Amino acid sequence: MTEKIHVAERLFELYHCVHRLVNASMSEEGVSLARSKFLFYLSELGPCRCADIASALSFAPRTVTEAIDGLERDGMVVREPDPEDRRAKIISITDLGRAGLEAALRPRRQMIEELFSALDDNERTDLHRLLGRLGDKACEIGTSRMAVHERQSEAA
């Protein structure tokens, strides 16, 4: 394997490890990492339709509907009729949902603090810069590949 592959593998391993740790610590507070994404979106942007959430978070509409069903059942969100479209519902976070989100975010913040204590300020700054460059390149690659895919679809 090349050095680039080794670095990429380490990055993937780190992501999965941190994801598991954060999800476990948040779940102990009653809100999994997946559920927190929906609650966070609603708390930041306010009431919206399921379709808006699906689009913003790049989730399938059915996935969003199922997640909102569970959050509604637990009293963390409410559905109300959309005044502009009788067929649609507006989803809003409840006070219980806000409290659950805040409780779940505390262990997430603690985990991040503990993890990044392994690096000094300069290393964190360098890592931030390097991850930014990799993120920009990934977006660039993704954009060009999507353009190729769209051209191929149009030609077919």
Image (spheres, rainbow, N blue to C red):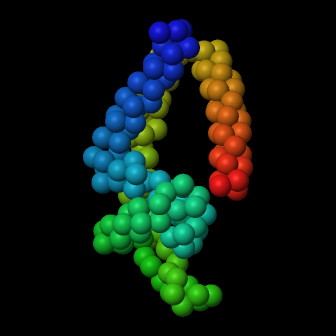
Q: Residue at x 35, y 50 (%)?
A: 32
Q: Residue at x 37, y 29 (%)?
A: 17
- State whether residue 4 appears in this view: yes
19 with respect to 80 (left or right): left
> Total number of numbered labels?
0
Q: Where is residue 86, by image quadrant?
A: bottom right
Instruction: From this view, report whether residue 71 is shown above or below residue 152.
Output: below
Who is closer to the viewer here, 123 or 13? 13
Residue 78 drawn at (x, y percent):
43, 76
Residue ranking furthest to the left: 28
Q: Residue at x 47, y 66 (%)?
A: 61
Q: Where is residue 121, by image quadrant?
A: top right
62 with respect to 127 (left or right): left
Residue 54 drawn at (x, y percent):
52, 62
149 with respect to 53 (left or right): right
Instruction: From this view, report whether residue 17 is shown above or below residue 78.
Output: above
Q: Residue at x 45, y 20 (%)?
A: 9
